[in-house]
Image: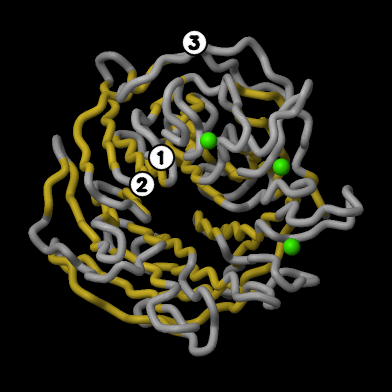
Amino acid sequence: MVLRAENRTQLGTAGRKLFGPVLVLIGTVPALGGGIETILADRQYVGTTLDEHVGRAVSADSELLAVGGLDRQDYLRWDSATSDWVLTGGFSGSSLLALDFHDGWMVTVRGPLGAAFVDLYSWFETPTPTGLQPIASAGDVEAIAATSTALALGRPSAFSNSGRVTVWNNNHGTWEPGDTFQLLNSEAFGFAVDLASDGSSTTLAIGIPGGTGESGRVQVWRRAPTWNLEATLTAPGAQADNDFGAAVALDGPWLAIGAPRHDTSFPDPIGVNAGAVYLYRRDSAGTWNFQTVLVGVDGDQFGSAVALKLATLAVGAPLADVGPHPEVLNAGRVDLFRRQGGLWGQIAVLQGPEPGPFDHLGTSVTISPRGVVAGAPEFDGPVDDNVGIVYTWSNTVPLFVDGFESGNLFAWSSSVP
Ligand SMILES: [Ca+2]
Ligand SMILES: [Ca+2]
Ligand SMILES: [Ca+2]
């Protein structure tokens, strides 16, 4: 089964655009209905200075939104009194490579170029260093994932043509170095990582998009209680230079893998680097089975970023042209899919209110119970270029999900505040 990412876009009335280091409410989001609709962002958070590239990285849960730029990291906290995100802290003078936040723990990579280090925080009212950092001291961490019990750091260029992924474990509040994963003679090992924990086991996905002329792979490891390689996945009909594994996202038994340089012969006969996202599902025997593939259109690089949570998949296509009249070149977009009965279908296209050429929306994307968040790090401000911007689309993620996979999204077995 092949589902095509719908390319139809329809811009509505442009929202009010304000600039400055505040999260600005710019509109309201319509309720989700049937069919594919275009949803414009309801809030935006804009960079302020030249080449700040705000939105290179984003991470969020229900209480905290973390925004990364080239020389800046900002943290916004959900204020239930005003029902809005409020800026509560940040860092500057650092070159952020990646960040993630989970279950009260936040890990960021920052530091001057060439000497980045990893910071680990517990988060209550303010970001509080644990006193254990830096937990890595190298300028080569490019991917991170975090849960309350484990961290994974991807260092794809750490060791020439090999790369490494290191795991740190939370031992009753003390973070300790754990196992190291490495694959010799494999380019870009650890370019993307994700972790999922279900209490008794931890799953680690390692993206290996490969080098020139190679097709990518993804390793899936499971710790219960020792690490076991459950699968090495390649795209069905794998092509060279598809970058399969450039983005990975785990959620329960589901794994989404981005291949942003996948070429399509259909629907576009010259769909060079249209991009694709492959979905796999783990069965009770521990086998990861290919389920479906979602594809972009010519040059979109659909699948450059993926987020998977709450039966929802958000896919960044940063080189998508959005329009319709005339199309804005490489403004980028985010496509939103929902799972129902084990099948995935597109429900929405997410855009900013005023897409600009080469904004690259969808370079980063994350899913919070409060909605989808995505970055357009080459967005131009009124004065300076490439200040970057982060958008939120509230109420685009279901609060209630059937955790037993029956497919009935309205029969809830868990709730997320
Ligand atoms: Ca290609
Ligand atoms: Ca394009
Ligand atoms: Ca720009």
Q: Quadrant of residue 108?
A: bottom left
Q: Which residue is mark 2?
A: 70
- Quarter in which the N terminus is drawn: bottom right
Check if mark 1's residue and mark 2's residue have beta carbons within 8 Å. yes
Residue 16, numbered circle: 3
Up-down: is 312 above or below 10? below
Report crowding for label 3: few under 14, some 14 to 19, many 20 or more residues within 10 A (C-alpha): few
Tag count: 3
Measure the C-alpha gap from mark 1 to mark 3.
23 Å
Say which label, 1 or 3, has the lower sequence index. Answer: 3
**Amino acid type for the residue under numbered disc 2:** Leu
Up-down: is 69 above or below 224? above
Disc 2 vs disc 3: which is toward the camera? 2
Check if mark 1's residue and mark 3's residue have beta carbons within 8 Å. no
State whether residue 333 appears in this view. Answer: no
Q: Which residue is mark 1?
A: 51
